[in-house]
Amino acid sequence: MLFLSLCAKPQKPDGAYVGSTVCKTCHPDVWFRFYKNAHFKSVASEKEKPENTGCEGCHGPGEAHVKAHGGKATIRAFSLLSPKETAQACLRCHSESLARSNIHRSVHTLNDVGCTQCHSVHKAATPKFLLAKSEPELCYGCHTDVRGQFSMPFKHRVNEGFMACSDCHNPHGTPSPTWRMAARPAMVSQGLVNEEACLKCHSDKRGPFAFEHPPVRVEGCESCHSPHGSPNSRLLRRPVVFTMCLECHNGAGAGVFGRTGNGVPMLSRAHNMTDPRYQNCTNCHLRIHGSNSDPLFMR
Amino acid sequence: MRLILRVIVLSLCATGLFAQVIAPTPDAVGPTRGDDWKDYNVVNSFETGYRFLSLSGNQNKYRSDENFGSGIRLLSSFMGVNSKNGHGILFDEFVLSTHGLGGDPYQSASLRIQKNRIYEYNLLWRKNDYFNPGLTTNGGQGQHLLDTATTLQDNNLTLFPQSRIKVFLGYSRNTQDGPGISTVPSNSAGDVFPVFTNVHQIQNDYRLGGEVRWWGMTLNWLHGWEDFKDDSADSANQFARSTPNHGTSPYWQVALFRNSHWIDFNGRFTYTGGQRAFVTSENSAGTNQQIVTYGNASRPVATGNATVSIFPTSKLTIANHTSLYNIRTDGDSAYLQINNSTGVINRLYYQYLGIRTVANDTDLDYKIQRWLDLNAGYEYSDRRITSTSQFSQAGSPGTAPYMQTNQLHAGKVGVRAQPLSRLTITINAEFGRASRPFTPKSDSNYNLLTGRIQYKWKTLQLAAWSQANYNDNSVLLSDYNSHGRSYSGSAAWSPKKWFAFDASYSKLHLETLGGIAFFAQNVLFANQESYYLSNLHTGTLAVRFAVKRFDVYLGYSRVQDTGDGRATATQVVAGPDIPAFRAAQTFPLAFQSPQARVSFRITERLRWNAGYQYFGYHEDFSSGQNYLAHTGYTSLLWSF
């Protein structure tokens, strides 16, 4: 496949180039502030080929457009392009980035979300990445359910400006995750090149530990936590801890569940579940993500 | 000029229409201003003011949820310097922005400096004061006191960012410090008592990498070293424990990729060699017991990924992704527990956990018409888990490694239609079947159906979304069924330059039924069911309008879990007839936050702002965690 890709010729648009100085005659509003645009680098370098710099780097050769005194039909107008055509135009330069190397398997691409639906080259709200709106409002525009999740009492501080969606997600697609069954999720970026994104910040949960809580490594943090937000403390999936633990630790499933296939261990007889002391599991099993000195995670 | 300014003000403000915190004020006139200085354009703004807080109810819960306090703040600042010709002496772009400095619980600063073709430097610094209340409720919250500050910084420097050969340098630091509560077993029955702990963790991450482009291919490599130190220590009367845990995780990533007109290829290999050395030394006079643990932990992780995307025609895209990852958690350790009274010595040994997964997925995307797009996919994963889970006592050997495998087959299908130029309809479905779930509630027999409708017409944007996520496992006693249904909708409308409206609503219906077994007063309760039902409604509303020199914002958000509709916490619905279980089946609550802000333009470069935000948290069946908080601020925003 690599050989085939090497044999393929890169895409080259046809036509004659007139240079950006011609464009600014009719489009001074765009050109006036273009020095603040990241794409201005190509103009400033003065070493790029015509097809890789300035207005025509994206909009294609402008000769016909100039001769026709304008018109969208005579130039590559992104408002008329399909999402796939837009992506092809942008990826001509922007595919040379590891962060976008999986864009063709991104859920966004599969659902025809094109580059210009999130990025606005000429009317960007953010100088970095030229986003059409700043995060998280940009993402909320489509992911309306996520907006509600970050309004919960317990949440990662996205609305507060402390974090951004792109801290954990790569909207351009990622390799398969190294947790769960490797199929999902498809757009969670990885920390330390191959770990769950949560561990970028929650480094104390990384381990390795002498005694790992196996679901943390096998299924990932989402086994117990709702990462965006939750009405429950510590982003837990249940309001009361013991019910969540008991859903797995029921002693059943011999031959099926658990790290030894003998079920997930049930609580010992010493646990009197009518006693509030035993209902707060993590009061005692406080190193629940892993421990170096106690297989029951109590120290 | 004023009209233009107002347009800019409102268009920029609209980007922050759904801000859930009242301050800082959206920088209404930032990027459009600027003064020229030599060959640079300089944009600057500062918002300085005072926050106030008035609180009644559970302070700890408020600190855990919001934590905004009183005091003088540099609520936000922005400085942007851009070279107008792209040939600055030291830099062509300098952007510095800060957020919440001076005492807010969520503070951040970002810096970006770059000179075209030479370098690009990005810094992100963040500080979060994290508070988690300890043992404050009788509802079984299972929390521990934590009052820690987490500080994160990421530095990334790229040399020659526009050339065919790039060099990457990076440094990240993550520290967590502060008091907390830990626990220690007080007897062989497993009873515990709380002890104070002083959390002190440091992570340093150093990165060095490069990228070479040649003949249309890109070779990217990265080598990093992550150092971690945990020197938290517990102490109490007649008890001492120290648990230093230090280690290094060197990691490598090599990627090779190429894009062309009809085929893209990318391959990536990563390796992380996680290492930790740990010691636990514990002396407890109360239990007359000594514990010493020492050892080295190792978790090498190797992954390989390869993606091939083919475009046979302009309408068809086929992407195939293959991944392999292998994780081994291994090491050596010895656990020595000596009871000075009985002389009994216990030894524990390291547990081994190995996970090897091979996955392949193929996606096809076909554009039937310009307005109709179909996609489908198939995913296959094969996972092998190997472990030794027996921690042996003296004289008894550990178990032989146990191995299990499981496979997941998942199919996906989706359609995207644009029957009208303004209307987009997307429907996606995914069906997965795993042969051997790892836990009773792992994805085993799941169905995911998602639909989305979006309508855009001029300044009106309507969106609706729905998802049904069912996971139906049924294995012996452990019947586990999780049915989640989500619905959401939003509307955004800005018919006039001086008016914008935004509203959203979402509902999550979550219903899970799990088989449980437990002991109560030495009696085994087997074949019980744990039933949990949540009906979570979330609504947000925001209106912004401008009148002469005033810019007014009104917002409201409400989260309400209506539970299962019961009248009392212990009302019998389903499951074990034990009050604690009944009370855990549902958890109705309400969390609301109305807010209002006014911003008055004193001059073109100076604005006065004032805002108020209310936070109200209310649980229906317990008042222990309820609180009412009145927060607000007044500030001056100076910009040029």
Image: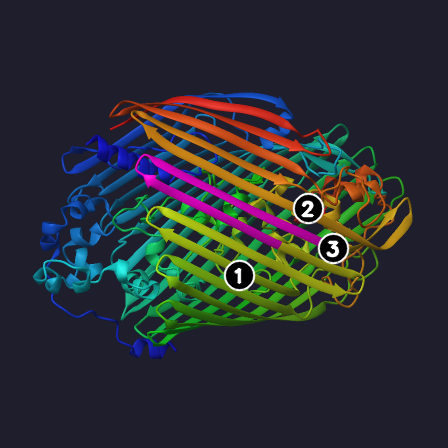
Q: Which mark is residue B592?
A: none
Question: Label 1, on which residue?
Answer: A177
At mark 1, the secondary structure is loop
The tally of labels here is 3
Q: CA distance from mark 1 to mark 3?
A: 28 Å
Could you tell whether B290 is left or right of B198 in the image? right
Residue closer to the observer: B443 or B3 = B3
The 10 Å Cα crowd at callout 2, few under 14, some 14 to 19, many 20 or more, is many
Left or right of B311: which side holds B152? right
Per the rendering, the mark at residue A238 is 2
State whether discs 1 and 3 lie on one chain: no
- The label on residue B513 is 3
The answer to whether one can see residue A200 in this image is no
Determine if the magenta segment contains residue B499: yes
Label 1 resides on the chain identified as A
The CA span between labels 3 and 2 is 12 Å
Name the front one of labels 1 and 3: 3
Q: Gap in Å between the C-alphas at discs 1 and 2?
A: 25 Å
Q: Position of residue B4 (x, y in %)?
A: 22, 35
User: Looking at the image, is mark 3 or mark 2 nearer the viewer?
Assistant: 3
- The foreground one among A13 and B283 is A13
**SS at circle 3:** strand
Q: Three-letter amino acid code at disc 2? A: Arg
For this rendering, which residue is in front, A273 or B398?
Answer: A273
